[in-house]
Image (tube, rainbow, N blue to C red):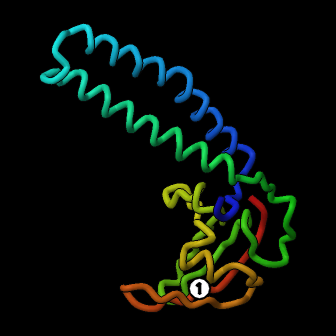
Amino acid sequence: MSDVVYLTKQRMKEIEDEYQHLTTVARKEIAQKIADARSHGDLSENADYDAAKEEQGLLELKISQLGELLAKSQIISSSDFPTDKVYILSKVTIKNLGTKSTETYSLVSAAEADFEQNKLAVSSPLGKALLGKVVGDIVEITTPAGTNKFEIIEIGKI
């Protein structure tokens, strides 16, 4: 088993619910599709059967991936960390020193990252740069578009 994946209690519940649904409801639905396709006769020329078997393979892959994720997941809470520095589950407001714009991000594990919801993975370049920093620190991120400097304005809890 590889590295531990840190998840919030809410995200862990979402993954457990999805896993439960896939292993019970979705598996039965696929089995029924395969049975229906078999009843149509010759399997060598049966597109419905081939499609159902492919769908079954993809479902089993997803179940396997979720199972592995659950096996190596550990629930963490923002109350586990102080707000003196940037940690996982910190809510960080940063100011882009080039554009003078500010943005607030929640630092989460890669399994929970969602840029549209401003949930930034701690393993991302910006996430890595922010970890361990304090209010007032300046971090530099080099991207293909150039180097950006950010000042940490505020640190809070998610």
Left or right side of 61 for 7: right
Which percent across, then down, holds residue 65?
Answer: 53, 47
Nearer to the camera, 88 or 95? 88
Which percent across, then down, holds residue 34?
Answer: 33, 18
Left or right side of 61 for 79: right
Which percent across, then down, holds residue 107?
Answer: 66, 66
Check the image and name the residue furthest to the top.
Answer: 39
- Of the 4 image quadrants, the one containing the N terminus is bottom right
Nearer to the camera, 146 or 42? 42
Nearer to the camera, 143 or 41? 41
Within 10 Å of disc 1 (Cα), the crowding (few <14, some 14-19, many 20+) is many
The type of residue carrying mark 1 is: Phe
Residue at 55%, 55% in the rendered image: 117
Residue at 39%, 38% in the rendered image: 58
The residue beneath circle 1 is: 150
Nearer to the camera, 90 or 109? 109
Q: Is residue 28 above or below residue 64?
A: above
Q: Is residue 95 above or below residue 54?
A: below
Q: Is residue 125 above or below residue 46?
A: below
Q: Is residue 124 above or below residue 100?
A: above
Residue at 72%, 51% in the rendered image: 8
Check the image and name the residue furthest to the left.
Answer: 45
Q: How many marks?
A: 1
Residue at 25%, 22% in the rendered image: 49
